[in-house]
Image (spheres, rainbow, N blue to C red):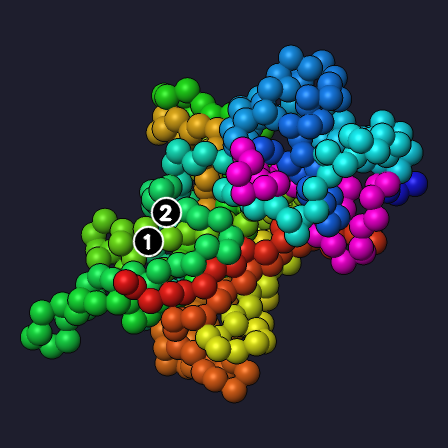
Amino acid sequence: MALKSFIEVHPDSHFPIQNLPYGVFKPEPASPARPGVAIGDYVLDLSVVASAGLFDGPVLKNSCDSFLQPDLNKFLALGRPAWKEARATLQKLLSATEPALRDNAALRQKALVPLSKVEMLVPISIGDYTDFFSSMHHAKNCGTIFRGPENPIPANWFHLPIAYHGRASSIVISGTDIVRPRGQGHPAGNSPPYFGPSLKLDFELEMAAVVGPGNELGKPVDVNEAADHIFGLVLLNDWSARDIQAWEYVPLGPFLGKSFGTTVSPWIVTLDALEPFACDAPKQNPPPLPYLAEKISKNYDISLEVQIKPAGQENSSVVTRSNFNHLYWTLTQQLAHHTINGCNLRPGDLLGTGTISGPEPQSYGCLLELTWNGQKPLSLNGTTRKFLEDGDEVIFSGYSKGNGYNVGFGTCSGKIIPPP
């Protein structure tokens, strides 16, 4: 019999009992932040559940103060046994057949808060943020645009998951406005470089892995054990100023073109919730070096969509439909490669996948590709865009389709505002 919650959950909801994603919220503006899980139109306050002594399994009964923290880092550090126990406890507690919460009106009133009333926060304290470049279609398109079609993907790309170290301090929660960055762009002719507001502001459709237990400095993580170091996934928009990026990135890679803002969705969907949607990763050719060779190489079937709501318009337009399963390098390969030199990851670190583009033009994951660097403007409800304009709002969504339910991520949105 299918698992069913005593809380009514709409069939289109992203948050049925099969999901139970983790976030951090404030029930009132003056309240301290606390962890919760989403269920239907509610958030279950885990600080209330913990204080009521309901996390009574062997792992969590001595560690339930991890749900009395302003972020999820302490819980992430406990590792997979604690995550599995918490999931089993919460699914039982919320199930239609379990009376402990269902029949306790006072506890229910305290523990279940309408999602419409809460303020969501970045759910983790992010010490470090790394952004990978793991979609072959994206790499090929970008290389073709900037270097021509003869050799679009550099030779090293097929041997290692390329990445750059991003800026953790400018990662913001969904719904936060993004200020258009200023910086330098390519000089025209013999003139000095352009300086001013970015003229080629873009979104990047990504997801990001949230690191659980880290590794000691000098001790790499085995690729076949890397999944135990990944708690779950969020939607991620790594906003990009393409003109700033193009002028600065040789020889050391992205800097000011990326560090002005990165938006994350509020809910972390666990790998356990995504397991029913695991699928084979693409065959890698040439075969990866032994430290990246996995016994089981898998992606997840997660449908992704991008909408743009142009400034001054009521309606948004879908500009991209892609899927997480288009990634060439897997999450576990990304994490193993990150640590192979001895680099120590820590709980709450964020590993972006890079832009997730599919093979078809309508599945490209950024405006750079969708408009081919501005050469083919997009049509949006009677207006056109080469790149983002002030007042434009970008909304990501993502979900996996189960049998009669969705396991979803909600939305990840941000609106562009002009520089001061």
In this view, the residue in front, 364 or 98, is 98
The amino acid type found where label 1 is placed reads Phe
- Residue matched to label 1: 260
Whether residue 316 appears in this view of the structure is yes
Which x, y percent locates residue 285?
Answer: 49, 50
- Does the magenta segment cover residue 381? no
The N terminus: image quadrant: top right
The amino acid type found where label 2 is placed reads Ser
User: Does the CB distance between marks 1 and 2 fall below 8 Å?
Assistant: yes
Which is more N-terminal, label 2 or label 1?
2
Q: Which residues are magenta?
A: 5-33
The C terminus: image quadrant: bottom left
**Mark 1 to mark 2 CA distance (whole Å):** 6 Å
- Residue matched to label 2: 170
Which x, y percent locates residue 204?
Answer: 45, 60
Which x, y percent locates residue 405?
Answer: 79, 52
* The quadrant where residue 52 appears: top right
Q: Which element is circle 1 on?
A: loop
